[in-house]
Amino acid sequence: MTSLPTSTDRKLGLVIDLDTCVGCHACVISCKGWNTENYGAPLSDQNAYGADNSGTFLNRVHSYEVQPEEGAAQLIHFPKSCLHCEDAPCVTVCPTGASYKRVEDGIVLVNESDCIGCGLCAWACPYGARELDQAEGVMKKCTLCVDRIYNENLPEEDRQPACVRTCPSNARHFGDLSDPDSDVSKLVAARGGMDLMPEQGTRPVNKYLPPRPKDAMPEFDVLAPFLEPVAEEPKGFLGWLDKALEKI
Amino acid sequence: MHPAPSVIFFTTFSGLGFGLLVWLGLGYPAVTGWTAFVFFAIAYAMAVGGLLASTFHLGRPERAIKAFTQWRSSWLSREAWCAVGALVIMGLYAAGLVFAGTRIAPLGILGAILSLATVFTTSMIYTQLKTIPRWNMSITPVKFLVLSLAGGALLSGQVQAALLLLVIAGVVQGLTWIMGDKALEASGTSLKTATGLGGAGSVRSFEPPHTGTNYLLREFVHDIGRKHSQKLRLISLVLMAGVPILLLILPFNHFFALLAVVSHVAGVLIARWLFFAEAEHVVGLYYGKR
Amino acid sequence: MNQPVIDLSPKVSDEVRKTTCYMCACRCGINVHLKDGKVAYIEGNKDHPVNQGVLCAKGSAGIMQVNAPSRLRKPLKRVGERGSGEFEEIEWDEALKIATDWLEPVRRKDPSKLAFFTGRDQSQSFTSFWAQNFGTPNYAAHGGFCSVNMAAAGIYTMGGAFWEFGQPDWDHTKLFMLFGVAEDHDSNPIKMGIGKIKKRGARVIGVNPIRTGYNAVADDWVGITPGTDGLFILAMVHCLMKAGKIDLNYLAQYTNAPVLVNEDEKSPEYGLLMRDENGKELVIDRVTGKLTPFDQPGVRPDLSATHREAGVTHRPVFHKMADMYLSDDYAPENVADRCGIPAKRIRAIAAELARVAFEESFELDHSWTDFRGEKHDKMIGRPVSFHAMRGISAHANGFQTCRALHTLQIILGTVEVPGGFRFKPPYPKPATAHPKPHVGMTPGGPLNGPHLGFTHGPEDLALLEDGTPARIDKAFTWENPMSSHGLMHMVISNAWAGDPYKIDVLFMYMANMSWNSSMNTRGVIDMLTDKDESGEYIIPKIIYSDAYSSEMVAYSDLILPDTTYLERHDCISLLDRPICEADAAADAIRWPVIEPDRDVRGFQSMLCDLGARLKLPGFTNEDGSQKYADYGDYIVNHERRPGIGPLAGFRGANGDKSGRGEVNPHQLEQYIENGGFFVEHIPEGSNYYKPWNTAYQDWAVEMGLYDKPMPYLFSLYVEPMRKFQLAAEGHGDRQPPDHLRQRIIDTMSPLPVWYSCEEENRASEFPVTALTQRPMAMYHSWGSQNAWLRQLHGHNPLYLPTKLMRENDLSDGDWATVTSPHGEITVPVLEMAALNENTVWTWNAIGKRKGAWALEENAPEATRGFLLNHLIHELLPPKGDGLRWANSDPVTGQAAWFDLKVRITKAATADEAQPEFAPIRSPVGTGPKNLTWKVGK
Ligand SMILES: Nc1nc2c(c(=O)[nH]1)N[C@H]1C(S)=C(S)[C@@H](COP(=O)(O)OP(=O)(O)OC[C@H]3O[C@@H](n4cnc5c(=O)[nH]c(N)nc54)[C@H](O)[C@@H]3O)O[C@H]1N2
Ligand SMILES: Nc1nc2c(c(=O)[nH]1)N[C@H]1C(S)=C(S)[C@@H](COP(=O)(O)OP(=O)(O)OC[C@H]3O[C@@H](n4cnc5c(=O)[nH]c(N)nc54)[C@H](O)[C@@H]3O)O[C@H]1N2
Ligand code: SF4
Ligand code: SF4
Ligand code: SF4
Ligand code: SF4
Ligand code: SF4
Ligand SMILES: [Mo]
């Protein structure tokens, strides 16, 4: 079971738009809320009201500064959860078979009742997408909300991951990346969606849309015609005004 | 990586224990009866003790048995099989020596192979990890095997072999450090590839996702000063190979032999601490910690 | 492969109850999923007009909020010294008896001896009604320290403001310019809007010294020098006017630009607008060339023509604007250095505004009729929109800066047009349609009218006969004549100083005044605990209602524990701060979706009880019995005017009327059935040009927003300001004290001006500006009790620009001492490159007092977290004139949080951020060690 399926029927995943993510952490907390109450053991918190507090999260938002050669530094908010890799090293290292990639949709999951909490899958994941729950002793990771996306107890429109549903700025998109006609595939094509750490050979399903070029407003020289003075002095201006008013 | 005592003890002592079993399996020294019992007892204490130590870092040790299921794909699972195989076969072999005073050579050789295989599978658990370039080198299993054999030779009193193997071990260990220091860069993984943001300029981690700590930081991000690590490397090399070699060159003396073993074990423990503490997991890049 | 079979359709919950989120004033709709009667999961309500299903981090973490270990459990009576945190739990009956015994004599003898102030309040129309019935003039909510500059500047200028009271036309705008916003009240809609326009590839320009959040996703970032936005904006006004890139038709038809101004320097009317006998502003009609009231049918007001009458010249406002803004003082080259923006960049942005507003203009096929009776078959879109918040308003020049921004959008013709900025009902509403402040007291009786409002000249000031302030906070006095929201941040210091007078009872609700919402935190703590010679506290009695164990609890004598937001009724009313959208009127409720497991009472319900015990007329029946059983009863049965109550939806006996209608006894049930809210869409064709659109005006009257149509002109020129100036120049019988005359003349210009606040804050010695920003995932002080959120922001480093890091030889994790004219703190630092090079900043309100919020004493919030508030004083540093000037806007009294100037030096590594305060005793203990939260099995 720990072997990877040679292919999956679909490749469900997320597309994250780094151009619009405002770093609000809404996805982080809605993920925590849904997954604490649903799939497997609750996501526990240690020292919840004290020092050195920490807890299990399946999705975390980093932030990076990019300093271009010229011009102002930029700040990019960077959400990260499991990328549901096609060549998921976290699956093949697992000694128990708890970690597996679903044949039907490519979702990488941990079967908690088989997990011995050896941590090896987390060691194998380059993205920091797996966290060993300190209370339960089993590995937790993004489930792509497998218990939402097919859930018949939810209205059709809500059958999407909690983080996608909640994202206020619409920076998260969910869909089938094996279907070139899906919205997510089109978005990836249009915006140059990229893989994280391609050299690790994990072939992530999730894609990131790079930020659009920043601080790229045309120079004033180009825009100058829009500010051609009608007059230099208040007096001249009032003269212009009179003429301009004639016309309206 | 977080240098957890459990894994340091596990790798060090199981390496030594299985190394000793290799020598015993091959009939060096050719012992029987109570002497054999003592040798095997030492080997089993180390190997089994090491394996037990390794279960301390499991979140669910009571389910450890499940680790046997994935031998087709998982090095950890293979290690489990090899270890049990080696221990069972060597147990029968030892019984022959201790109780019947006979050496069933094929059993010994098979046991020796399994013991070596155990060390190899252990090393492959680390070597396979692309996420830790410092481990992801073909010299890593060589190092584990050589150290295991050298330690085994030392424990089994194979002075000539030990001398040779200690020299090789020292050299291999040195090489892994030299190569390891370049491994992260050579892997091509950097904050730029991790974020894909390199195109626009230089990338710097600004704020971590949480002001508090988390499992990833505890497990994968361990900062050790360069000066500190150079000093420890030297100490480890001296204790692991230098001192034992010196003591072995001196006329044989039981006390010196004991000292050589102690020194070697101490050196390997330090090296193992460094093996983990110095290992840069690429996830640290996301936290600006590389 | 045979893979595990998992349950793909687990039951989500037993029941979903729809109510309204509370964690900020955005007030999103939420679906509360319950299992076994307990909250299991909270998500956004897809049908809700505000959030359409999305939810922020705070909203999703509501489950940790309603279950926080810091919740108060029972009324508390102080037994130790104030500030010790020693309390005794008492029964509600005793608590209410104590409150009644304290308040009854105050009301009978001198109601002004009660100061009743409410903080993060979402029921101001109710609490002010209570205070009015009590009869004290001393009531306000927190707007004065929050963003009154934004509200007042918007309402005086254009009858509505940014804040949560309006929004860009997200569906049509092509250029969105955002000034000084980190999060704001409309937080989810702003994020949704930014997402929308980014999807269309429209441009976002962020003006902010700090590039995080919205400014990080902005296509262009203007890292302006704090406090100089007014200058930058007026420089763009200069460029646009000079280039004639202004919407002349819009200015002529819909603003007071053509209204004539008296130019006779000697006249007591100098600078006042010309009006007819009915008070209507006069313009010259371009068609007839005649003087005429602005609103007559067919009038085409002339922006240019002057008028001479009785020897006095009258020039249109627009002439004065030309005189002022075409001056070289506002040329980009002359402001560039001050603003820290190159002149070419200022011009480029102005040109881009002009290009998009006029070249990308478009039309919507909606016909409409304006207030002059003229029919238009199209609506002209100007797809440039603006939004701004405290970054420009929390400065002492904030009122004028906000006005400058409104001037910019008005000359571009982008307010209330497609693609521009639009009001949300009940706005637009001219300043004159709001009440004026009332301070008429009768011992034992109610106040003569609402406390807060808009002044239109010296005659409206809240002064006593002898000219001293009528209100404890000195609102509506010469020091801040247009302080429409009161000055909550001055209450404690004024009451302590007995200036203007002493009080007997301080009654506060939902404001952490001994900590993060005060300036000069240590000083405030001292004032709260200070005693007179006889050993009595100088502020004798403090009653406080909080739901949690906040820092303020320790400084109160009587604690009335509130419920949490899922355990009570609340009303988000059109009379107050509703949840409307630009296209719809909407209001909402909260209702008890779970029962409290503690002996606590909803504050408003408690006020119904207390009001009856005090025999307040609005809360007592004729037979002396309690009028409203609880807040739910009030919400349904109270009527402000006949047919108009707290809720606009489901009115009338059958619940089929909207806006106006008789009381509906089943109103709350119908709200609940509808998802906790009510929405009424503005018909197409009525939803733009609202201040002048007859169809909208009629709709608003029908909805009960107004009693009659009230079209009005935007006030580029704010005449009431001129009236205060005139008084300062010596006209009229209500005269300001001499020391304030010049300041009033300088700062109350009826056309927006910019002035520097640097000197007062001693910028030459303290050259660095220190700011705070709201973290998107925290709400002021109260997010820290939330086990999930506090992992995101458990402490708050001070972010320094690269230049200051190098200059001071600092690296990440080092400690620095930050000194202001008022104090000193020592805090950990982190480097940030995307930051104005003379600005440092930190997240707001993360620092906590040891012992508060049920946190352990070594929690990082209390050891590394810190407040900038220790560095900010409610008074400016002494100027040597013997007077202490307030650290607030001279027009509105808005607290000038962001004028703070500091100096940075490297400090030795410290264990804890300084200053350190002694722990307070927690009335609720501390929370559990670990959490494995799961409600269902
Ligand atoms: N340095 C600096 N200081 C600032 C600002 C800044 O930008 N910089 N911003 C200022 C601004 S704009 C504001 S508005 C203030 C905000 O400051 P505050 O108004 O003090 O806001 P909170 O800290 O949220 O405190 C509100 C109190 O309400 C309590 N509370 C929460 N929920 C309930 C409830 O359901 N019922 C009751 N009865 N109580 C409840 C909380 O426990 C808390 O004690 O801070 C101001 N202070
Ligand atoms: N998540 C969350 N949301 C909240 C709150 C909260 O505590 N948490 N609080 C609510 C409250 S009470 C309020 S008042 C609103 C306030 O909402 P905001 O107005 O967004 O409040 P601040 O976070 O104070 O942000 C002020 C911004 O102005 C910038 N700034 C400071 N000085 C200048 C300047 O001179 N020029 C310019 N251009 N920018 C400047 C700062 O860098 C900062 O980004 O938010 C409300 N919403
Ligand atoms: S919810 Fe959306 S905008 Fe917020 S941090 Fe997550 S991805 Fe970014
Ligand atoms: S992101 Fe990590 S955990 Fe997820 S599939 Fe890839 S390797 Fe596995
Ligand atoms: S922690 Fe669990 S899932 Fe991960 S490798 Fe070990 S057994 Fe497999
Ligand atoms: S898909 Fe579900 S589990 Fe994965 S990050 Fe989003 S909310 Fe969390
Ligand atoms: S923005 Fe967040 S905290 Fe504010 S009301 Fe909406 S969900 Fe609640
Ligand atoms: Mo505020």
Image (cartoon, coloured by chain):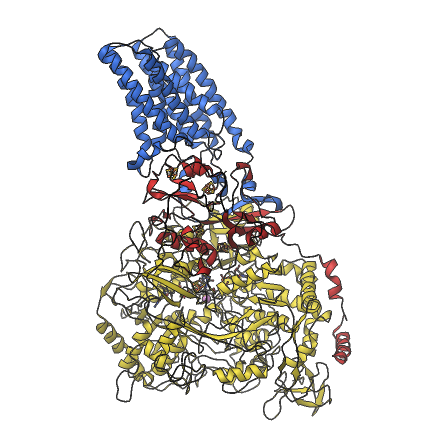
Chain colours: A red, B blue, C yellow
> Between residues C206 and C507, which one lies in front from this camera angle?
C206
On the image, the x and y values in percent for residue C555 come to 31, 65
Report the quarter where the N terminus of chain C lies.
top left
On the image, the x and y values in percent for residue C796 come to 44, 52
Question: Which residue is depicted at the point 36% across and 24% down?
Answer: B82
On the image, the x and y values in percent for residue C406 come to 60, 72
Tell me: residue B222, above or below residue A227. Answer: above
Residue C375 left/right relative to A115: right
Viewer can see residue C550: no
Question: Which residue is depicted at the point 73% across and 87% down?
Answer: C287
> Between residues B282 and C842, which one lies in front from this camera angle?
B282
Quadrant hosting residue B237: top left
Tell me: residue A189, above or below residue B100. Answer: below
Tell me: residue C193, above or below residue C572. Answer: above
Quadrant hosting residue C353: bottom right
On the image, the x and y values in percent for residue A22 come to 52, 56
Tell me: residue C109, above or below residue B224. Answer: below
Viewer can see residue C401: yes
**What is the total number of numbered labels drawn onto the structure image?**
0
